């Protein structure tokens, strides 16, 4: 079965772990796959799938629109090659409608509702709703979401039936680098965050928390890895407090795992906003797969549906300092090694990409063999 995935995401992007993992998984499940995205010709030469490059504007806010416009130009000539299409919601409803009119079954992929704020967010929400409306109207056959909360939100907003949705959460690969965590009594607690360094993700607020933790007698450091609109502010804080903070630029997946293995606790600072409450955070699984403990803001996007975990501590934002102090002070070196091992085991059993890939492949195969 030959699938085309039309995505706005560049595969060398810091956030491209999900499309990479799902694409490899579909190939392993026996699908033929073509990726259409803004990467340059030749950038996918090392991958097992075919690639079609479609250009987009470099101007923020116009990227999705320009990409979709250019995709529409080539669809009539290439659509007959494909038995089904996966389309990111950002690509837009017009691409979905054209594919459906050319008798190509379409599946909408939603890895996150709009995360931006202000005017750009309002424009993105319009595209999001119009894209999902194609599922409601039966133009697209199915929609993929990242969590049960995300599915509930889509159903509530647009009246889409549960039978038209499938949950494909973010997965992970268990990190084989290093042993279970160890920490000497004289060593500081090493926190780490990797991902987008954007203002609405609670990055700067957690940096303030780290300063307060040290004032409360908890010897700790924070490493931040990534890029975003608060990168300059992060770098300033690192210069002002070099013993507390380290900044590292974007890394590839293997480099991330190597860096994570040098820390003790992964951080989920994203606040209780709608976009994060609906999420299935990739970094949560990667922290656990590396044997890290996890701390973060308490909301549905960070919790596990099967209850509290001893290696994960969530707190209300205003109570961050006191809550983290109690958590780390309750853990000795033996506890840390045990909790680290349990975190890795949980990630291996429940958070592997194979679960998401199986769901994705099952929907594609089931719908097209009715």
Image: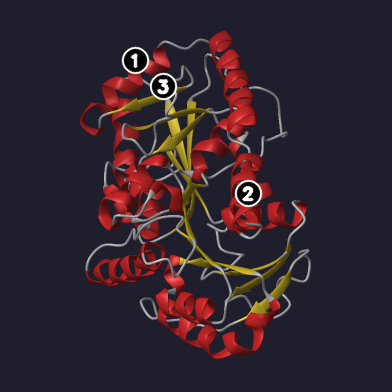
Q: Residues within 10 Å of mark 3 (few under 14, many from 20)?
A: few
Query: Circle 3 sits in a helix, a strand or a loop, which is it?
Result: loop
Note whether 368 is above or below 208 in the view shown.
below
Residue 8 in picture, x, y percent from top left: 51, 71
Q: Residue at x 48, y 24 (%)?
A: 188
What is the number of the mark on residue 326?
Answer: 1
Badge 2 is on which residue? Answer: 362
Q: Are marks 2 and 3 in contact (CB under 8 Å)?
A: no
Residue 267 in picture, x, y percent from top left: 43, 36
Badge 3 is on which residue? Answer: 307
Q: Residues within 10 Å of mark 1 (few under 14, many from 20)?
A: few
Q: Earlier in the sequence, mark 1 or mark 3?
A: 3
Q: Residue at x 53, y 27 (%)?
A: 264
Q: Earlier in the sequence, mark 2 or mark 1?
A: 1
Of the two numbered discs 1 and 3 in the rendering, the one whose residue sits closer to the viewer: 3
Q: Nearer the viewer, residue 23 or 266?
A: 23
């Amino acid at each position: 079965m030959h699938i085309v995935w039309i995505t706005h995401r560049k595969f060398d992007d810091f956030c491209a772990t999900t499309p990479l993992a799902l694409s490899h998984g579909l190939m392993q499940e026996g699908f033929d796959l073509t990726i259409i995205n803004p990467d340059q010709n030749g950038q996918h030469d090392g991958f097992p799938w075919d690639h079609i490059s479609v250009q987009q504007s470099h101007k923020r806010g116009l990227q999705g629109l320009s990409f979709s416009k250019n995709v529409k130009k080539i669809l009539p000539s290439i659509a007959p090659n494909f038995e089904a299409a996966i389309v990111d919601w950002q690509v837009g409803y017009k691409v979905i409608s054209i594919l459906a009119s050319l008798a190509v079954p379409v599946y909408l992929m939603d890895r996150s509702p709009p995360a931006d704020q202000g005017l750009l967010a309002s424009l993105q929400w319009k595209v999001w709703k119009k894209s999902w409306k194609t599922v409601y109207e039966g133009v697209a056959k199915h929609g993929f979401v990242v969590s049960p909360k995300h599915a509930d939100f889509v159903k509530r907003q647009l009246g889409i039936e549960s039978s038209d949705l499938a949950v494909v959460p973010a997965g992970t690969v268990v990190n084989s680098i290093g042993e279970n965590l160890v920490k000497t009594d004289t060593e500081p607690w090493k926190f780490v965050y990797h991902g987008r360094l954007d203002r609405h993700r609670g990055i700067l607020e957690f940096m303030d928390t780290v300063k307060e933790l040290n004032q409360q007698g908890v010897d700790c450091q924070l490493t931040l890895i990534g890029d975003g609109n608060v990168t300059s502010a992060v770098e300033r804080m690192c210069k002002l407090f070099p013993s507390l903070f380290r900044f590292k630029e974007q890394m590839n997946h293997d480099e991330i795992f190597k860096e994570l293995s040098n820390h003790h606790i992964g951080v989920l600072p994203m606040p209780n906003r709608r976009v994060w409450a609906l999420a299935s955070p990739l970094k949560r699984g990667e922290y656990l797969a590396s044997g890290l403990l996890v701390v973060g803001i308490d909301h549905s996007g960070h919790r596990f549906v099967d209850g509290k975990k001893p290696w994960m501590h969530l707190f209300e934002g205003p109570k961050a300092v006191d809550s983290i102090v109690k958590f780390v002070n309750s853990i000795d070196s033996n506890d840390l090694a045990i909790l680290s091992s349990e975190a890795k085991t949980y990630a291996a059993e429940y958070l592997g990409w194979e679960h998401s890939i199986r769901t994705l492949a099952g929907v594609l195969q089931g719908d097209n063999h009715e």
